[in-house]
Every structure is written in C-alpha cells, then in structure tokens.
Image (cartoon, grey):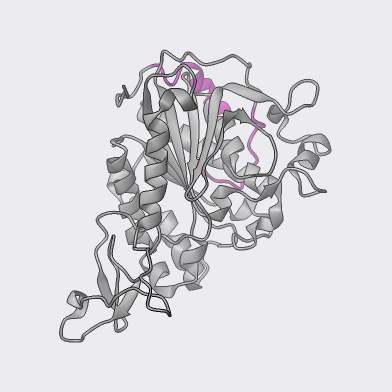
Amino acid sequence: MTSRRLSRSVLPAALAAAALIVPLVAAADAPAPVPKHDGKPADVTKPVQVYILLGQSNMVGLGKITGGEISLEHAVKEKKKYAYLVDDAGKWSERKDVRFVRVMQGKGLMVNDWLGVKTGTIGPEFGIGHVVGNVVDAPVMVLKSCIGNRSLGWDLLPPGSERFAEGGKVYAGYKEKPDSWAADPAKGPATEPPPFVDKNGKPIAWYAGLQYDGDVGDAKKVLADLGKHYPGATKYEVAGFFFWQGEKDAGNPVHAAHYEKNLVQFIKSLRKDFDAPNAKFVLATMGESKKGGDGNGGKILDAQLAVDGTSGKYPEFKGNVATVYTNPMAQGGSGNGHYGGKAEVYMDVGEAMGRAMVELLKDGKK
C-alpha cells in the first residue's frame, strides 16, 4: 500500500533552524558545511519520502572516488571537505535513514543499499541525500533512474509532446519515429513518417520518449516492491525530482530551441505519472553554460532558468520548481567532459541541489 498524502511529520521544527545553513540557490555563495547525521535510523512507520534522480551521464555520475587529486578520497582525507561522508575513524560511513537505489535500462538494479560511499564513481546523490536527509523527519529514498547520452528532445521526450514542423522537416511527437523526416509542404506536420529502419532495412526499435518510459518504468518497479528497497517500509510518497541534463540537446539546434517547451512538459508529465502533483522539482544547469551566453548551450541555459519558480514566467511553478546555476561550481569543466572526473564538482552540485530542494520543501510548509 502506498501513501500519496503529504506527511505533516516530514519536516520537523528543526527545519527552521536548518535555514541557517541553507542559502538561496545563488550557488556562488559559500554555504556552511553540511553537518554529520546523528546515525539514527528513520521511523519506518512513516511514509518513505522518495526523491527520483533523472538525466544523462552526469546524473549517472563520473566523479572519481579514488585516483589522485581529483578524487573524493583526496577531497575528504587531504582537503578535509565533506566530513559527513566519514565516521570518526575516517572510514566511509553509511546513513541508516537514507536508502540509495540505482537502476538503469539494460542493467536493471545496480545499487540497493544505505547511502554511503562504496566503489566505482559518484554523481550528485551523496550531496543530495545528506542535505535532504538532514531535514526530512522520515525515511528517505534517493532513487536514481537514468543512463547517459540521452536528449530531452528525443529519448526523454515526455508524454503529451506533439510533432511539429520546422526547417522543412517534421519532428516526432511522443512515441513517434524516426526523430525527424522530410515535410510535405502541403501537409506540414501532418506529413506521415517513413519506416524507421537501419541501413540494412531492419526496423529500429526506438521512438520518441522511449527512455522516458524506461526510466519512469524502472522507478515504478522499485516502488512497487518497496520493502525490498527500503527494509521495513510499507508506504511511500514521491516528494521530489532532481534533473541534470542538457548536453545532448545542445548538439541539436532544433532540440535546443524547443528545450523550454519540452522541459515544462517533462515536469508536468513526471508529476502526473507518479501521481505526485505536489512533488518538488530541482534541476541543475550545465556547468559550462554562462548567463548571457549564446549558441545552443545558451538557449538551454535560458530555458532552464525560465522554469525556476522565481522567474515568474510559469506561475504554476512558483515555490515548487528551482534551477541551480552550476557554472560557479564546475571548476572550468564541462558536462560533455564529465568535469574531468572531479568528485568535488559532483559533490558541490549535489549539495546545491539538495539545498534548493530544502528551500522548496520549506515553501510548501508555509
């Protein structure tokens, strides 16, 4: 049985105090260090607060845990950063109140454990999980469902997206294929698509939004077997979404031009598909994109900033959608270059996204 009601006990009175360590999403400001958790498990009689992470390769995470000065190990042990990741003996610690579950199309369940540094690489999940976990008075699940090299304009195109004509081509709507085809001037968007086949004439099993369907479907499978993924839990609610994406769309001028429209539909579709109309949404920009920039990256950045609830462009997003501007945290790196594998970038972006979510949760309780 799942609970769709917002739990009154999710944010304790301590949340007001947490505001002292949660700056606005200015990102350039130096926030106070994230405190260590008290180590206590959560009360599993309360609904698990689920936060779903979506995007492409940088949300998947390519920050190095070990391996020289760019690694998380170096940042923690030598630079004394992110002290909340280790115990008093300096060993990687686990949170018994925050569960980390990771799934990926083609690989299935990859992680199902308490939040803690293990092996491999990291994304923003540790910053997110610790910041949010510190202020949510309930079990928390960080559920990552994504894969790399996916565009919002094609692979992640959300339900409700309609085909359109531009530059002599028709671009696919949700569940249509191929991604584009020549438009008949007399028919425009009504031009029917040709067969979607490879060079050998074999049908290609892909369509607009296939990755959206896969990532959403994988997350729903986890939640359908909640006790397996959060031991002892019987109820949950999807409290929020985190999204870090944009690089592949920046490689396609049409996708970049329509990014804002697709992003708005993406937010609305996720809330509908998870029956979570009150779920908050936090997205991070591409680190290489600077305000005032041009080109496809500039268009995507402008779109990402436009959906922030404080922009005023989308009144329905006020107090429930936030954009984190990551350029000041990128250390000169780029999304396509995966920030050189620098763990600090992934940690700093994760913390900033977590703080943005906490601000939205606070707004929702006013």
- Which residues, given as a range, are shown in magenta? 9-34
Of residues 102 and 237, the one nearer the viewer is: 102
- Relative to 172, say whether 228 is above or below: above
Residue 228 position in % (x across, y down): 47, 25
Magenta segment's dominant SS is loop
Q: Is residue 286 visible?
A: yes
Of residues 120 and 263, the one nearer the viewer is: 120
For the point 41% across and 76% down, the residue is: 198
Residue 317 position in % (x across, y down): 33, 45
Compared across the picture, whether 301 is left or right of 28 comes to left
Asked whether 12 falls inside the magenta stretch, the response is yes
Compared across the picture, whether 251 is left or right of 155 comes to right
Residue 197 position in % (x across, y down): 36, 74
- Relative to 102, say whether 151 is above or below: below
- Relative to 136, say whether 118 is above or below: below
Q: Quadrant of the C terminus?
A: top left
Instruction: Name the outermost residue toward the left.
Output: 186
Asked whether 53 falls inside the magenta stretch, the response is no
Quarter location, residue 34 = top right
Residue 333 position in % (x across, y down): 67, 59
Of residues 191 and 336, the one nearer the viewer is: 191
For the point 63% across and 53% down, the residue is: 328
Compared across the picture, whether 171 is left or right of 76 comes to left
Q: Quadrant of the N terminus?
A: top left
For the point 55% across and 62% down, the residue is: 289
